Amino acid sequence: MRLQDQLMQQLTAAEPEMIKIRRYLHAHPEVSFHEKATAAYLKKFYQDLGLTTTDYGDGYGFVVDIDSGHPGPQLALRADFDALAIQEVNDLPFKSQTPNVMHACGHDGHTAYLMILARTLSNLKDQLHGRVRIIHQPAEEVSPGGAKSMLAAGVLDGIDHVLGLHVMSSMPTGSIGYHLNAAQTGRANFTVTFTGKGGHASMPHLSNDAIVAGSYFVTALQTVVSRRIDPFDTGSVTIGSFDGVGSFNAIKEQVQLKGDVRLMNEDTRQTLRDQITQIANGVGATFGVQVDMNYDDNYPVLMNDAALTQQVIDSIRSADIPEITKIFDCGPQDPSEDFAYFAQAKPSSFIYAGCQTAPGENHPHHSPDFMMNEDCLLIAAKAMGSATLALLTAPED
């Protein structure tokens, strides 16, 4: 039997286990940088297979190396395993058992498919060439992210290429999406505090209203993208929180705003930062309020290596996987991903598996009712498995 057929057959047989793992993880989520029990569960899976786990980074990240014993490429496959601080509203038998924590982005699915794929590749390793490094990464959702410390610890030393996959509830189940070059936005976050002087609402002349200053800041920010960014570039600035809660008859002394910045061209990153900072300081000078700005430039633009990504997609097409009904260029994606740090370090490819529950249904990522069609798990495993074989199989094989 061909190696490709062996891989497909073993993955298909393991689909129920894949779903079982995903549901266990879904029921027991842990937020970024606190995934202790999740990491222990994953490690036990590998240790029961007789595979060694090696910790990397400051958090709970670890790797499993599957060495064929034959010379060849060094490939890494990565999946994240953190959850979000969201209260799940779905009425599922495996809904989150942890209050205010939920797998609302599909990382439970990423982890489940990669665990079963890793076991299958281990079973077939004698027929491969080179090595597969399985990277289980924590803390993708929260800056500075889990990838950064794993990289600093040398997780990609000796690795040639890195592959990753994200399930997408906006894409039909059965589809594989990809994009060459700049594939996902870079990101920054900022917190700005305006401090004036509080007072009685009937005596505004004796006070200095921080709410007015903050409101002008929000309005002025609307010019950053429209007047400072090239129209052919992508950028967004969003105020996600304006904390000015007080009473109806008191002038607020201090307000705090939190903002989100996205970009698709790293050349615009400094422009965005400079403009936002300049506007904040300008508001401070105009209204005579104190300004405290904390600006965090974090995730880079995710750059897919064009040649590698094309090779990955060609291998998935050639595999003729029956569960995959569509392979398409989905264009750049709006969310940010700390996989981008891996892509900065090594030629990498990050692709997408549709997980829409049914045509027309909408269960967005990061929402309390996020759901996936679990058929996507087998599709993800087969797609990434096919790409792995293409990269680690000698031409004569």
Image: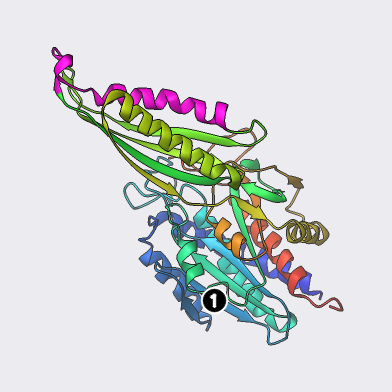
Between 364 and 343, which is closer to the camera in this rendering? 343
Residue 85 shown left or right of residue 376 in the figure: left
Q: Residue furthest bottom?
A: 69
At x 59%, y 68%, the residue is 116
At x 45%, y 39%, the residue is 260
Determine which residue is flagged by label 1. 64
Query: Is residue 211 covered in magenta?
Result: yes
Between 107 and 284, which is closer to the camera in this rendering? 284
Residue 285 coordinates in the image, percent (x, y): 32, 28
Quarter of the view holding residue 339: bottom right
Predominant SS along the magenta part: helix
Image quadrant occupied by the N terminus: bottom right
- In the displayed structure, would residue 201 be above or below residue 162? above
Between 60 and 228, which is closer to the camera in this rendering? 228
Residue 394 coordinates in the image, percent (x, y): 81, 78
At x 44%, y 58%, the residue is 139
What amino acid is found at the position of numbered circle 1 in the picture? Val
Image quadrant occupied by the C terminus: bottom right
At x 16%, y 25%, the residue is 198
Residue 144 coordinates in the image, percent (x, y): 43, 56
Query: What are the residue bounds of the magenta stretch?
Result: 199-228
Please rate how many residues cluster around mark 1, counting C-alpha atoms within 10 Å: few if below 14, some from 14 to 19, many from 20.
Answer: many
- In the displayed structure, would residue 28 be above or below residue 123? above
- In the displayed structure, would residue 306 be above or below residue 359? below
Q: Is residue 369 visible?
A: no
Residue 254 shown left or right of residue 373 in the figure: left
